Structures are given as structure tokens and as C-alpha cells.
Image (cartoon, rainbow, N blue to C red):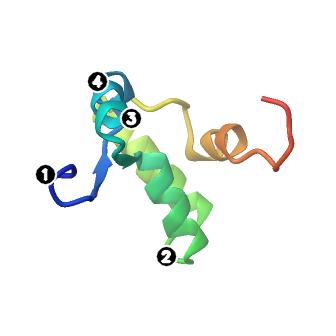
Amino acid sequence: MAKQREGTLASNNLRDIRPYVEKYEISHITTGDILIDAMDAGIITEAEGNIIWSDMIRKRRMLPTATFSEYLADYRKPEGAEE
């Protein structure tokens, strides 16, 4: 559907979607991207993002860090910062 409608694929399972995203040049987002966008838009705070994140982990969702705050620190590095 994302390919046919030129949409965005939302998934945390990057290993499974990567070949499809690369083959069809589809944009994709993760839970972290959505929470950062919501925080930037003033819809949620970082603390609320941490609650959402911990609820997802409690439901056995696979996320790249233990907390949303850690995700922010790891994935929102200042421009030009070393990886």
C-alpha cells in the first residue's frame, strides 16, 4: 500500500522492511520518529514519551533503547557530531 499510494511505511522491524524500503525507495518511520515529532509539535513531553516507551517495552515490543530519553540522546545527535 505504501508503494502504490506513495506513502510512508511505519515499522520498528527494520530488518524485515529494509529490503522492501530500499527496493521501492519508500520512506519509513519508527515509533521513535513518531514520538520525536509529537514532542517537537508540543503534543507530548519527554516524560510522556518515556511513559509510552516503557508501556511498549512492558508489552514486549522491541525498541532500540531502554527509554525514550536514551533514544533521544542516541538518535538526535547534534549535526556534525561523531557517530
The residue singled out by tag 1 in the image is: 1
Cα distance, mark 3 to mark 1?
28 Å
> Badge 3: how crowded within 10 Å, few (<14), some, or many (20+)?
some
Badge 1 marks a residue whose secondary structure is loop
Q: Tell me where residue 54 appears, x and y as whole percent.
A: 44, 42
Q: Amino acid at mark 3?
A: Ile
Q: Residue sitting at 56 percent across and 67 percent down? A: 39
Judged from the image, the secondary structure of the residue bearing numbered disc 4 is helix
- Look at the picture and state if 64 lies above or below 29: above
Eye-nearest disc, 1 or 2 = 1
The residue under label 2 is which amino acid type? Ile
The residue pinned by badge 4 equals 16
Residue linked to disc 3: 57
Tell me what residue is drawn at x 56 percent, y 39 percent: 67
Q: Report, in whole angstroms, how far the alpha carbon at label 4 lies from the one at label 3.
A: 20 Å
Disc 2 target residue:
43
Q: Nearer the viewer, mark 3 or mark 1?
A: 1
Q: Earlier in the sequence, mark 4 or mark 3?
A: 4
Location of residue 7 in the rendering, given as x and y in whole percent from the top left corner:
27, 59
Between residues 81 and 70, which one lies in front from this camera angle?
81
Q: What residue sits 69% from the left and 48% below the top? A: 76
Query: Quadrant location of residue 75?
Result: top right
Element at badge 2? loop
Q: Amino acid at mark 1?
A: Met
